Image: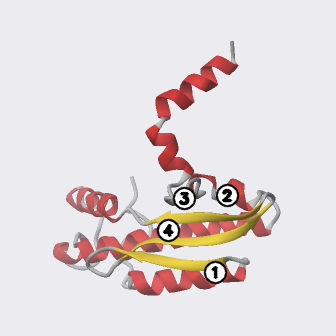
Amino acid sequence: MAAPVNYSTKISAAQTVAEMQALLAQHGARRISVDYDASGVPSSLDFLLATPHGQRGFSLPASVDRMETLLQKEDAAGRLKAGSRAERTSRAQAERVAWRVMKTWLEAQLALVAAGMIDVDQALLAFLQVDAAGRTLYEVYREREAAALELTRGDSD
């Protein structure tokens, strides 16, 4: 396995989120907002985009805990080289990397949309907000995964 993409970034989470906001605005986003955790670090980026079915809300979270675990695992395996061990595997670095990875992913998805290869709702489907609480389609799916999979099995009979 190769080192995680963007693992050596020095760009702050706040700067990356600002870049993502600009990117979304260029692609027609409305009402962009940022949620922050208790320590003042961005935790999710919420926005409205026009889809073939009208304006829809999306929520992009950064899984900092998972990124921190990955950086520690990859560092222990000797795949991370930049900076000191403490810097490479710190919570602050995990925040920077998690947001940078989300930006890279978002850029790729919006490039596919701009090229007409996919629709925006197709690109961002898992992050589509589906209820008044702002839960995403993926969150609801995970909550009801067994029932959702049972429905798909029933369709093939």
8 or 142, which is in the foreground? 142
Disc sitting over residue 102 in the figure = 4
First in residue order: circle 2 vs circle 3: 2
Kindly state the secondary structure of the residue where label 1 is placed: helix
* Residue 154 sits in quarter: top right
First in residue order: circle 1 vs circle 4: 1
User: On the image, numbered disc 3 is attached to which residue?
Assistant: 132
Residue name at image x 22 percent, y 73 percent: 90
Q: Position of residue 122 (x, y in %)?
A: 70, 54
How crowded pointer 3 is (Cα within 10 Å; few <14, some 14-19, many 20+) is rated as: few
User: Which of the two marks, 3 or 4, is nearer to us in this view?
Assistant: 3
User: On the image, numbered disc 2 is attached to which residue?
Assistant: 123
How crowded pointer 2 is (Cα within 10 Å; few <14, some 14-19, many 20+) is rated as: some
Callout 3 amino acid:
Ala
In the rendered view, would you say 66 is above or below 48? above
Disc sitting over residue 23 in the figure = 1
Q: Is residue 92 left or right of residue 57?
A: left
